Image: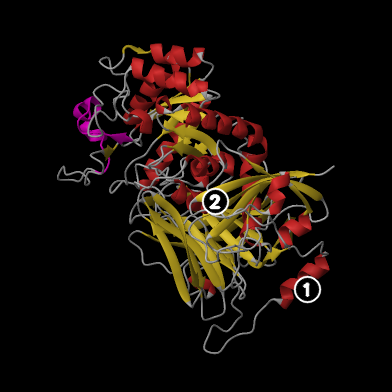
Amino acid sequence: MIHHLRAAGTSFVLDARGTGVPVIVHWGADLGALSTAALESLADSQVPAVGPSSIDSPLRQSILPVMADGWSGRPGIAGHFEGSSSRPPAFRTSSVELLETGLRITLDAASLTVVVDIELTTDGVLRQRLAVTNTGDSVYALASLDATLPIPGRARELLDFTGRWPRERQPQRRDLANGTWTRDARHGRPGHDNAFLMVAGTPGFGFRSGEVWGSHLAWSGDQRLWAESASTGHALLGGGELLDPGEVRLAPGGSFASPWLVSAYSDAGLDGLARGFHRFIRSRRPLSTRKVMLNTWEAVYFDQGAERLIELADAAASVGVERFVLDDGWMTGRTDDRRALGDWIVDPVKWPQGLHPLVDHVTALGMDFGLWVEPEMVSLDSAVAREHPEWVLGRYDDGALPLPWRWQQVLDLANPEAFAHVYAQLAALLREYPIGYLKWDQNRDLLGGSAHRHTTATYALMDALRADFPGLEIESCSSGGGRVDLGVIERTDRVWPSDTNDSLERQAIYRWTAGLVPPEFLGAHLGAATAHTTGRTHELSFRLATALFGHAGIEWDVTTLDPAEHEAVAEWVAAYKRHRGLLHSGDVVRSDAGDSARWVHGVVAADASSALFAVVAMTATRDAVVGPATLPGLDPDREYRVAPVRLGAWPRVVQDAMPPWWESGSVTMSGRMLAGVGIPMPLLAPEQALVLEVRQVE
């Protein structure tokens, strides 16, 4: 039978006739409603010619490409039965089930069964997951189990990402030539240089134009994404968990499931791709109102005490903060970053009455209380490491440990005793104090031990805490943005995109992270004038505009604000509260037009009735007077009023006079005019941003 899944402008057609492995006929633009006869005609028409010097039957892209079917590229499954030299498995279809959300295909080979789940969500997101079971009599050493999807020949340009601490998700583009472009992550986490999203598209695709096909692996451990173009004419995207040799050995009857490969298609560029991903994530992880928070790290670092932090809490409440998060330094003996990780007990020296004086004061001010933890890590200078050295992950047979990283090691949460210990200490804190939020950090690569078991155990710990403490929110921080993926977002309420609060760096990080992750999941903090990660100094107006478009917070010693700064920050907090319903539910849009030194991005309400945009001068522009800024994504046939938003202070400009429309305070244009013609902007100085509010004219 031929199966046709349709949703949100996307079609997926699978030819499951016969007993061979089902073939993917089409993944891309919606083909409309098709009869059985039309589907059969389509599938038959897509059977390719038999090329010279090749197998003697047409080579088609199946849901599990393997050598036995003539596929000489990267296989969907690889491994071997220990002690055997058996031939590569040849799979045949034993069943195809039509589920409410998609398809389940069961494939059998000698001593192996693979089940492939395929879902096309109402948002047009395609999900694939594979599970293999050893039905034989000996151990099967699994090398890889990967999901793949075909892409058409016109998708000849690739986009993926790289980066470093603290400059994550920097784009890189290349042509898709013959061969395989592979991005491996071997950090025990996705890492700061993670590929993040592998996108293939028609040459020159942008935010608002071109056909694009994109895939992301929903997994927080070692992984790989790739694009492959074979000389046979086949091209595909693929991804799966990256396994170490011998890491997964399936005894007879044993099974292993891959992570979900989450993919989407758009004929409207990267913004169309983001819209599908965002709506999918929101449907699975609806969030409560994103409260303005203050995190104490860059305000006090390790210099903690009740008097100092109560003063900080008073200042935070005075500007409208709704959640106060105590960062690193509260644990017993934690005077710097070289000791006490793993001992999740309040320091009796810094906090002789426990955290109660601070927590009681914070809650009396009407704020929630949150706490920083790093449950996966351990300092060798800690009580837990001294009492249980066997709980340190990755110890070699000679007793040596992996190289230290930030003077810490990894705690083996896959050890049931270590897991129980950490859970008990965290649960005790959550029972003693009204902690509604955990900032969950992870500050090193593994460099040893099983990344699969560690990631699975971390998920289990998060799941257990959420189950036992309903309403608990968790932020995923991994020395900044080292673990930003849809696997961790299944069980967290926020990700920290980067450790830098440098607004210029953050503009780029938000721009590209938002290609997958909705704004309400992205921590966006107002930092001090001089960023501690770069030494770069920015004016307050630029920092306020940058931190508005996400889940807003503050990472600054607000006790030091002068009266003008205090008023500006309070005004910004009020603006965030006023606009967060739109910012956290609308569609992210990014403009391709204009001088590359000037970026335009925004969020448009789902019903297109309103929007909030930022016009950002990233650097000096090529021309003295830059052309009008276009505002994409609005309803072309509606009229809109566009007005500037003052966030504490207006941005710095370099000009003799404002554009005339500014004097009237607003301008009214149709959505078609705003997208196609645009509006002249004030001449922003480099590293300045102007926020615009757009409202439909009734």
Query: What residue does disc 2 label?
Result: 653
Q: In the rendered image, which quarter is residue 345 located in?
A: top left
Which segment is the magenta one? 377-394
Type of amino acid at the residue the image marks with label 1:
Ser
Q: Is residue 651 covered in magenta?
A: no
Q: Residues within 10 Å of mark 2 (few under 14, many from 20)?
A: some
Residue toward you, 113 or 341 = 341
Q: Is residue 392 covered in magenta?
A: yes
Comparing labels 1 and 2, the label whose residue is closer to the camera: 2
Type of amino acid at the residue the image marks with label 2:
Val
| Quadrant showing the C terminus | top right
Residue 515 has which mark?
Answer: none
Vertically, is 191 above or below 572? below
Q: Position of residue 295 (x, y in %)?
A: 43, 30
Extreme residue in the front direction: 656
Between the residue at mark 1 and the residue at mark 2, the CA separation in whole angstroms equals: 62 Å
Name the secondary structure under disc 2.
loop
* Position of residue 606 in the picture relative to residue 504 (left or right): right
Q: Position of residue 672 (x, y in %)?
A: 78, 58
Vertically, is 602 above or below 145? above
Name the secondary structure under disc 1.
helix
Q: In the rendered image, which quarter is residue 679 located in?
A: bottom right
Query: What residue does disc 1 label?
Result: 41
The colour scheme used to paint the residues is secondary structure
